[in-house]
Image (tube, rainbow, N blue to C red):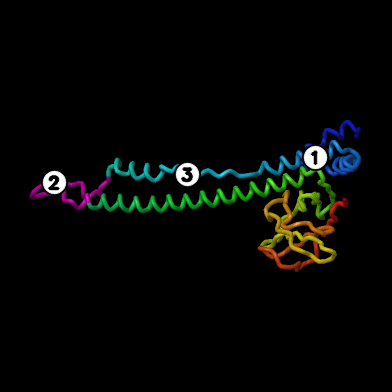
Amino acid sequence: MSTADLHTLTGAYALHALPESERQAFERHLEDCEACTQEVRELSATAARLGLAVAEAPPRELRERVLREITTVRQETPAHGRRERTGGGGRTGRWYAYALAACIAAAAAFGGVAVWQNQVAQDARQEANQAQRQNDQVAQVLSAPDAKSSSAELGSGAHGTVVVSQSHNRAVLLASGMERPPSGKVYQIWFNDEGTMRSAGLMDPKASDDAVLLDGPVDRASGMGITVEPAGGSAEPTSSPVALMDFPTA
């Protein structure tokens, strides 16, 4: 593959869409091409922001509209109540009382639905805001002028690239092709602080491709590891690492 062809692979590389032979050739090319390196950082930062979910709150007038429309719907009476009454004619107030009770019950029910919908919307907004903040931090690390990266095989065909920015004192792991952990387990990331493992957060157990902002500052960590831990994570590693990666040197 010519150098001119390699220049066109930045987008596919940022999305982890290259076959193994082309990926290796392109990574060798990145060592000598600052333009492609910068473009990969920018494309990776953009890709990291595309997964943000947007939550939309229900309309404020939902409850009022439902209660207003209830009053325009005719209450259907039971079949035995449709016959004419003898001895005085006309309907008693019984069916009116039933209809009124039904409306009151419906109003209470829809009031509860409105409260529940509002809580769901608030939770969704909080999750979206948190995801937005994390995506912004990922983008800042990936596009930092001093960002440096290193890549390694993570086993079972998986591939990882870690990007470190000393100015932000943060690191991002871009993983692709990860097998799902066993049921009830999760991948946990660890900083390697001169042989002492410090928790750096959890990976999404449902995602084979993931961009993870490592939890906490890089400080003097020289690398990172990944272990399989019980759901929720552990205070310290409880299994042998499934992958070890050195951080890029300055």
Left or right position of 135 against 152: left
Give the spatial CA distance, label 2 vs label 3.
44 Å
Dominant SS of magenta comes to loop
Identify the image quadrant of the N terminus. top right
Q: Is residue 218 above or below residue 40?
A: below
Instruction: Name the spot of residue 236 as percent of width and height, x first.
Output: 74, 68
Select label 2 or label 3 by which is in front: 3
Segment colored magenta: 75-96
Instruction: Tell me the crowding category of disc 1: few under 14, some 14 to 19, or many 20 or more residues within 10 angstroms, Cα based.
Output: many
Mark 1 / mark 3, whichever is N-terminal: 1
Q: Which residue is mark 2?
A: 90
Indicate the secondary structure of the residue bearing disc 3.
loop
Q: Amino acid at mark 2?
A: Gly
The answer to whether residue 89 is magenta is yes
Instruction: Name the spot of residue 200 as percent of width and height, x first.
Output: 74, 59
Q: Which residue is mark 3?
A: 58
- Report the residue at 71% width, 67% height from top: 235
Q: Which residue is mark 1?
A: 40
Q: Is residue 77 above or below residue 189?
A: above
Left or right position of 14 against 124: right
Q: Is residue 238 above or below residue 162?
A: below
Q: Are marks 1 and 3 in contact (CB under 8 Å)?
A: no
